[in-house]
Image: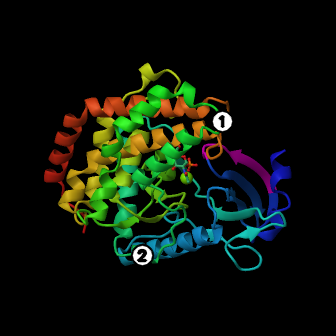
Amino acid sequence: MTYNAIKRVLPHFCFEGQYRSVTELTSGNINNTYLLEYMGATGPRFYVLQHINTYVFRNPREVISNISAVTNHLRRALIRDGESTERRVLELIPARDGSNLYEDEEGDVWRAYTYINDATALDVVETAEEMEQVGRGFGSFQRLLYDFPAQELFCPIPNFHHTLKRFYSFVHSVDEDRAGRVKFVEDEIEFMFEHRRMMGSIVRMLDEGVIPYRVTHNDTKSNNVMLDNATGKAICVIDLDTVMAGSALYDYGDAVRFGASTAAEDEPDVSRIALDLTKAEAFTKGFVAETNGFLTREELLNLPLGIKVLTCELAMRFLTDYIDGDVYFKVNSPDHNLIRARAQIALLRDVERKEAQLQAMTERLIAGGEGRL
Ligand code: GN1
Ligand code: MG
């Protein structure tokens, strides 16, 4: 079944050796991802093949161009720092025509990477040590890219974290009520209206120049950092589809939202959902250790705000997609998006309860940090 989905595509990429097998990797909510095994002259070779969702990424060539520019920069930055580039940066496998993607007859777009061996991407972060490494991973990603000209990147999804514009399109969806579901979610809609001002606060700070635009990852779930199986250390940040100009608060906030939650993003029992302060602190420690030298004081002090904004934004995105009739995120049941929205709302309520503690913890870590630049 899985092989049938990809067999036509395989000959178009420069994979080395003989095809052996394919497994679908199912943790993403947008693209379809496959792990391929080939047998090369010197032993097995593993690749990741992805079918890009062109409903979400309207211009996949721009996405690939961003990834190519950013990975080249990361490679140069590692070399400049005297570090090895082996398994540290995503490596695109070219298509036979020399470009970095393959577009089939139906207009479906595919791309491929070398698989990073002997490393793990965590869907669930179990320990504080792991969470600190995830923080190191995303922090060093920002550090290595701090001198990359953000304005040179394409914007793969306009207004991706423009929470205020997302609020307006949410209101539009409520107004249209295309799937007839608004009547089921009145409390959740009310919640979004109550949080409207808070949600717009990062965008306002960027607009007013209080905090700068930087090259950011914008999808900093723990499973987008590979941890080395032998050392446990963060070695490579993956899933660079949404790399673009943004705020450091987005990357920090989204990572804590995901990795420090006590439950999965689609946990139906909201009583099980809370923010684990130990994990939030561990992430902050790793992130601040890598970024303290160049993030501004304003950014560092506002990191906890990032958690609130990103949690609320995602709650609103899931809710919007539920109201629209599930057109954006992959779902496994008709109420999957609603369950996800409610889970993020429960998480945000707990973040709000713990706000003072998060702020105190952040200020303590900033004061004690050394910084690497
Ligand atoms: C999507 O597919 P995945 O897991 O990389 C989404 C993120 C959300 C995330 C929530 C392009 O990411 O913004 O935070 O789901 N990516 C896009 O799980 O919309
Ligand atoms: Mg992603």
- Which residue appears at 35% of the width and 75% of the height? 147
Residue designated by label 1: 179
| Three-letter residue code for mark 2 | Gln
Task: Tell me the quarter of the image containing the N terminus.
Answer: top right
Q: Is 125 situated above or below 223?
A: above
- Point out which mark residue 284 bears: none
Q: Element at badge 1?
A: loop
Q: Magenta stretch: residue 28 in it? A: yes
- Of the image marks 2 and 1, the number of the one nearer the N terminus: 2
Q: Residue at x 42, y 56 (%)?
A: 162
**357 sits left or right of 121 in the view:** left
At label 1, counting other C-alpha atoms closer than 10 Å, the crowd grade (few under 14, some 14-19, many 20 or more) is: some
Towards the viewer: 57 or 238:
57
Q: Which residue is mark 2?
A: 151
In x, y percent, where is residue 230?
Answer: 48, 49
Callout 2: SS = helix
Mark 2: few/some/many CA within 10 Å (<14, 14-19, 20+): few
Along the horizontal axis of the image, is 1 left or right of 238?
right
What is the distance, in whole Å, between disc 2 and disc 1 at their CAs? 38 Å
Of discs 2 and 1, which sits in the foreground?
A: 1
On the image, the x and y values in percent for residue 287 come to: 31, 53
256, above or below 9, in the image: above
Can you see residue 127?
Answer: no
